[in-house]
């Protein structure tokens, strides 16, 4: 029982935990659950374009996200999910948003590759 309480106390938003880097990595399974009650802005940060996850709201290149903050919610506490093909570009974008003061940033661990490995499809390919 104590271990269950400790585990719950260490958990983060939506069952995932915020890392030392200030954003939350989510698995494909966690993201699929998040999509059932979509209360976030989803951003594809991959360049060049290789498709979108369902319900993607924006495409902003990972290396331009700091210059394109006007495309994102102005509320720095708004929930934002970032993804790319493998996770490298979205990690860079997540770090940029955290440095800009965003506090509710999520990043898909493994990106679109993990999504496809789970047997899920991309849109716009």
Image (cartoon, grey):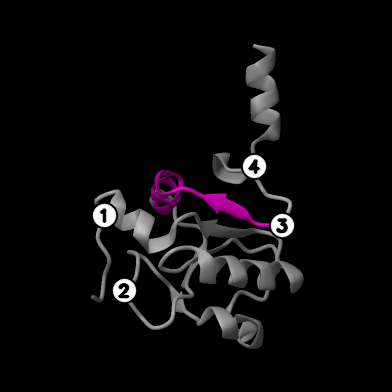
Disc on the earlier residue, 3 or 4: 4
In the image, residue 117 lies at what x, y percent?
30, 52
Q: Which one is in front in this view, the residue at disc 4 or the one at disc 1?
A: 1
Residue 50 is a magenta residue: no
In the image, residue 6 lies at what x, y percent?
70, 24
- For marks 3 and 2, give the CA distance: 27 Å
Q: Which residue is disc 4 drawn over? A: 12
Label number found at residue 51 = 2
- For marks 3 and 4, give the CA distance: 11 Å
Q: Which residue is disc 1 drawn over? A: 120
In the image, residue 55 lies at what x, y percent?
36, 65
In the image, residue 103 lies at what x, y percent?
71, 61
Q: Is residue 71 visible?
A: no
Q: Quadrant of the C terminus?
A: bottom left
Label number found at residue 67 = none
Asked if disc 2 and disc 1 are in contact, CB closer than 8 Å, the reply is no
In the picture provided, is 8 more to the left or to the right than 123? Answer: right
What residue do we see at 56% from left, 39% from top?
Answer: 15
Q: Is residue 88 above or below residue 18?
A: below
Q: Which residue is disc 3 drawn over? A: 22
In the picture provided, is 121 more to the left or to the right than 85? Answer: left
Residue 25 is a magenta residue: yes
Disc on the earlier residue, 3 or 2: 3
Q: Which residues are magenta?
A: 22-35
Residue in front for this viewpoint, 86 or 99: 86
């Amino acid at each position: 029982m104590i271990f269950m309480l400790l585990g719950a106390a260490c958990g983060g938003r939506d069952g995932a935990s915020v890392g030392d880097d200030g954003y939350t990595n989510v698995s494909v399974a966690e993201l699929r659950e998040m999509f059932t009650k979509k209360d976030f802005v989803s951003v594809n940060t991959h360049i060049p374009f290789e498709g979108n996850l369902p319900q993607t709201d924006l495409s902003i290149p990972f290396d331009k996200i700091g210059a394109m903050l006007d495309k994102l919610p102005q509320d720095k506490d708004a929930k934002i999910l970032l993804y790319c093909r493998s996770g490298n570009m979205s990690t860079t974008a997540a770090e940029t948003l955290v440095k800009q003061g965003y506090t509710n940033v999520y990043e898909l661990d493994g990106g679109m590759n993990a999504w496809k490995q789970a047997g899920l499809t991309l849109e716009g390919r």
